[in-house]
Each structure stands twice: as structure tokens, then as C-alpha cells.
Amino acid sequence: MVFSEKLLQRLKDAENVAVLTGAGVSAESGVPTFRDPGGIWEKFRPEQLANFEAFMNDPDFVWSWYQHRREIMREVKPNKGHIALAEMEQVFPKFGLITQNIDNLHFRAGSKKIIELHGNIERNFCMKCRTFYEEIDLSEKKVLKCEKCGGLIRPDVVWFGEMLPMNELRIAEESAANADVFFTIGTSAEVYPAAMLPIIAKRAGAYVVEINTKPTAISAELDEILTGKSGEILAELITVMKSTRNLK
Ligand code: OAD
Ligand code: ZN
């Protein structure tokens, strides 16, 4: 992969780097994306499962779908891309990793500060008293009730029709607006407000780079497009970043 002189110079000078990731960064780990052929929405209509009414109508069914997805996500491992992103946190004085993924793979790869816009499948909470429950046993096939109040326990993920967590969104927007270089990686950039972040960065003067296997809804508006698998490109990029900044 050839990186432009302009990108190399920007990375050399950058104080502040922000990254937005989507399902594509986990594709090389074996987690299916949403909108690619064979993706999750081809098998299940989202309105059937990932929403409040569906859960209230048949909590056991929706719960079992999430348990199934947790099973997939626990079996897979972070890939070279997740690992490179965890290393990038050490390279720049300020670094923001913003993810739309709920699969917990950035955390497992060693990233410390992660802004989770759509929640995390390993976290759950009681809908009545908001007690949190983590890393639930996969043998629990029926929806769990809260130990404290008996309320229904749901996954801490953003469902269709729900607002994004306000604090996370605010921090993400700030990171985008303050970035010298902004990467949008493995996301189709079709779901808002996440898809606004590269545009916010661009308007604020960042050099905005997309890494994706194919063009997206916003490619034409960005500064540089790196076409290919994010795991492979990020592994090369982290080596370049370290050498331009004289790090081991
Ligand atoms: P999508 O499935 O919409 O897009 C995945 C993107 O990854 C596509 O642009 C692919 O071309 C790209 N891609 C696939 N394999 C890749 C690879 N190895 N390397 C780089 N890119 C690759 O997923 P998202 O953009 O993440 O929201 O979807 C956004 C949101 O839509 C999700 O967070 C989810 C869904 O509704 C919620 O659940 C709230
Ligand atoms: Zn409770």
C-alpha cells in the first residue's frame, strides 16, 4: 500500500488523531457486517429484533438472538486492525477511538479509551432500576430478571428508534472537530449521526482518510481513500506512523 506524501506529512505533524470504526474492521475476525452480502440484515430484518417493541413482545426471542451474537463475538479474536488501533493510542498525544461496533473487540485488543456510540453487547442493564450486568453466561437462554428489583434485563446496545448515548456523542463530535487527521474505517457511512463525524472533521480542517474495501456514501468528500482490507492496511500504517515519529 502506498501512502501519499501528504498523509505522511500530516501524520508526522499530528497532535490529535481520531478514528471512526464500523463493522468492516471486525470482518477479518469473522464477525458479519450489516450491509455487505451475507450480512446480518439479510438474515433478520432489524425491525424484527433490534428494537424496543420486539423485545417487549417477545423478550426471550430477542434475548436468544443476542446470546447467539455474543457467542459469535466471544469465539472470534481481534485482528491486526484492532491491534494496530490499540497501538495508535500510544503514538499520538491525543487520540480518540470512536466505534459503532458493539462486539467488544477494540477493548479485547487493548484499546483503553473507546467511545462506544452504539453500546456494547457484553453490557446489559435492568430496564427498571438500571443496575448493570456484564459478561452474562451464554447458557442463559431465557431473558434474565434483575436480582434487585425483578425488572427485565436488556443488552446495553442502541436499538432502532433510540437515541445515541448523549455523552459519547458529544465526546465523539469534539474529537472529530479537534482532529488533525481523521480516519473513517470499515463503515458504510450510511447511519447517522455517526456518518456525520468524518464530515465534521473535514469541515474543521482535518485531513480525512477512508479505509474500506469499496467506496462509501461519503468517499467523494474525503481527502484520501485507501482501498483494501482494514486489518492489512492498518498493520502497514502503524509501522509507517511509528517510523515517521521515530518510535519503536
Ligand atoms: P455496514 O455493514 O453498513 O458497513 C460495513 C462496511 O465495511 C462496508 O462499507 C464494507 O465495504 C466495509 N468492509 C467490509 N469488509 C471490510 C474489510 N475487511 N476492511 C475494510 N472495510 C470492510 O456497517 P456499519 O457502517 O458499521 O447500528 O453500520 C453502521 C450501523 O448500522 C451499525 O453500527 C448498526 C447498523 O444499524 C446499530 O446497531 C445501532
Ligand atoms: Zn432492577
Image: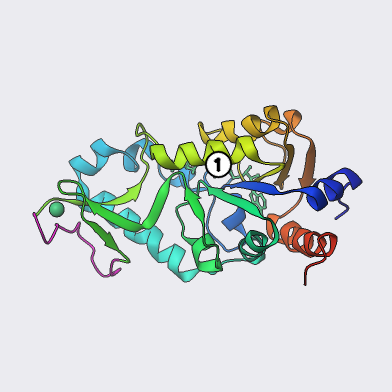
Place of residue 57 in the rendered image (x, y in percent of width and height, measured from the top left): 19, 40
Residue position marked by numbered label 1 in the rendering: 35
Q: Is residue 235 visible?
A: yes
- Helix, strand or loop at mark 1: loop
The residue sitting at 23% across, 63% down in the picture is: 141
Quadrant assignment for the N terminus:
bottom right
> Residue 65 vs residue 232: left or right?
left
**Count of all numbered marks drawn on residues in the image:** 1
In the image as oriented, which residue stretches furthest toward the left? 149
Mark 1 sits near ligand 1, with its Cβ under 8 Å away: yes
Region of the chain picked out in magenta, as a range:
136-149
> Which of these two is toward me, 112 or 43?
112
Q: Is residue 189 visible?
A: no
Place of residue 95 in the rendered image (x, y in percent of width and height, measured from the top left): 62, 52
| Residue 147 vertical placement versus 179 (above, below) | below
| Residue 10 vertical placement versus 108 (above, below) | above
Residue 145 is inside the magenta segment: yes
Q: Using a 10 Å C-alpha cutoff, classify the residue at mark 1 as few (fewer than 14 neighbours), some (14 to 19) or many (20 or more).
A: some
The residue sitting at 35% across, 31% down in the picture is: 161
Quadrant assignment for the C terminus:
bottom right
> Which of these two is toward me, 30 or 202?
202
Place of residue 194 in the rendered image (x, y in percent of width and height, measured from the top left): 53, 36
Q: Which quadrant of the view contains residue 77?
A: bottom right
The residue sitting at 33% across, 57% down in the picture is: 123
The color scheme shown is rainbow
Residue 202 is inside the magenta segment: no
Name the amino acid, label 1.
Arg
Place of residue 172 in the rendered image (x, y in percent of width and height, measured from the top left): 53, 41
> Residue 140 vs residue 216: left or right?
left
Q: Main secondary structure of the magenta part?
A: loop
